[in-house]
Amino acid sequence: MPPTSPAENKALVLEAFDALFNKRDYTAAERYWSDRYIQHSAHIPPGRDGLFNLVRGLPNTLRYEHRVILAEGDYVIVHGRFSGHGRPAAWIAADIVRVEGGKLAEHWDVLQDEATEADSVSGLPMFGDRFPA
């Protein structure tokens, strides 16, 4: 398979995240994630099955949205919010994905709870232009 462009990789990551986290379409997600997927997150069990099983165990209210996405070569970084996962605060994430052969092959992340306006020392929201309700 020929290498994919950074623009194609960005589109692939967004389609994959939407299929898995928002639509819960595991059949489609299998087409996006490599069966040799390497998971570096401390919060997610190893491999594609570890990720899929984690999502299966989360409430159906789980939502993913992104704001900023950057790509260079085979790497994509996306700044996003995971909400509706059953915890008091949404997670703000910087997900780093390596694409190989048109599939998500490897993943790292940085996660933190979304701050409220009262908790934000900077006085600015962590995601978008508004604080969570």
Image (cartoon, rainbow, N blue to C red):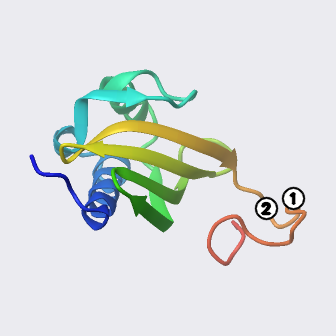
For residue 14, side relative to residue 112 (left or right): left
User: Which residue shows up at 88% across the image and 64% down it?
Assistant: 118
User: Which residue shows up at 86% across the image and 72% down it?
Assistant: 123
Q: How far apart are marks 2 and 1 (CA)?
A: 5 Å
Q: Image height check: is 91 above or below 66?
A: above
Image coordinates of residue 78 in percent, x first then y, are: 48, 58
Q: Residues within 10 Å of mark 2 (few under 14, many from 20)?
A: some
Kind of residue indicated by mark 2: Thr
User: Which residue shows up at 82% across the image and 67% down it?
Assistant: 117
Label 2's element?
loop
For residue 62, side relative to residue 36 (left or right): right
Rendering quarter of residue 10? bottom left
For residue 61, side relative to residue 100 (left or right): right
Q: Image height check: is 38 above or below 110?
A: above
Image coordinates of residue 45 in percent, x first then y, are: 45, 22
Residue carrying label 2 = 116
The tally of labels here is 2
Q: What numbered label is drawn on residue 96?
A: none
Asked whether the beta carbons under mark 2 and mark 1 sit within 8 Å of each other, the answer is yes
Residue extending furthest toward the bottom: 129
Residue carrying label 1 = 119
Label 1's element?
loop
Q: Image height check: is 116 above or below 101?
A: below
Kind of residue indicated by mark 1: Asp
Rendering quarter of residue 85? top right
Image coordinates of residue 61 in percent, x first then y, are: 46, 50
Q: Residues within 10 Å of mark 1 (few under 14, many from 20)?
A: few
Image coordinates of residue 11 in percent, x first then y, are: 28, 63
Quarter containing the C terminus: bottom right
Residue extending furthest toward the left: 1
